Amino acid sequence: MLKLLGRLTSINVRKVMWTAAQLGLDLDREDWGAGFRSPREPEYLAMNPNGLVPVLIDGDFVLWESNAICRYLAARHGATALLPAEAQARARVEQWMDWQAGELNNAWRTAFMALVRGQPATPEAIAASVDSWNRHMGLLDRQLAGTGAFVTGPDFTLADIVLGLSAQRWKNAPIARVELPAVEAWLQRLGRRPGFADYVGNGMP
């Protein structure tokens, strides 16, 4: 039995759960994180020294970092539609997954944590973060306008899962947003995928 440790209010937990839904997997999820058991407990830190959710347990194998978990689940179950076996096609998917985890996340972090999570930040820092967030989402919009379908081309992949959650957060955030028609059309396409309503379009920030 695959076990996932992490609260459902975490966007990184939800990206793993949406991946599992695409694969038809029934993950045994256990609540850890804010409002539940602390990931700073020694038991948890022994599995993930970062003290962050989620953690995947597959028998004796323990894995952290949500994008790595998504890739592992796809590879473990031979889901080459989500994570292609061909080197260049796979690299394209992983390129956009890494961009999400690095560039895009860094863009929204200050604004989101201040406006939604209530962490302190100056108005100038929030405004700069919002501007960067919109600029990065504009880059995604141009990519989607070019493909006319999904992030890396005509097929739905893990890149759409991780970026779909990020885009939904941008759409729901209390910020001034730019108009991004390709992103909006893409989110509507994603809305027809299994698990979207449960893990993406569920109103969670």
Image (tube, rainbow, N blue to C red):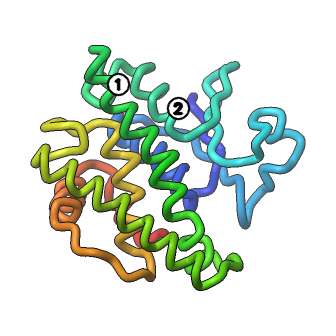
Q: Residue at x 62, y 44 (%)?
A: 54
From this view, report whether residue 201 is shown above or below residue 56: below
Q: Dot 2 surroundings within 10 Å: few (below 14), some, or many (20 or more)?
A: some
Is residue 199 something that shows in the picture?
no
Q: Nearer the viewer, residue 50 or 101?
A: 101
Q: Nearer the viewer, residue 185 or 139?
A: 139
Between marks 2 and 1, how big is the CA–CA gap?
Answer: 14 Å
- Which residue is most to the left? 148
Percent from the top left, x then y, of residue 152?
23, 37
From this view, report whether residue 86 is shown above or below residue 94: above
Q: Which residue is mark 1?
A: 91
Q: Earlier in the sequence, mark 2 or mark 1?
A: 2
Q: What residue type is disc 1 on?
A: Ala
Q: Dot 1 surroundings within 10 Å: few (below 14), some, or many (20 or more)?
A: some
Say whether residue 9 is left or right of residue 179.
right
Q: Which residue is mark 2?
A: 68
**Secondary structure at numbered mark 1:** helix
**Secondary structure at numbered mark 2:** helix
Percent from the top left, x then y, of residue 104?
45, 54
Percent from the top left, x then y, of residue 93?
33, 32
- Which residue is most to the right? 42
Depth check, mark 2 against mark 1: the one in front is 1
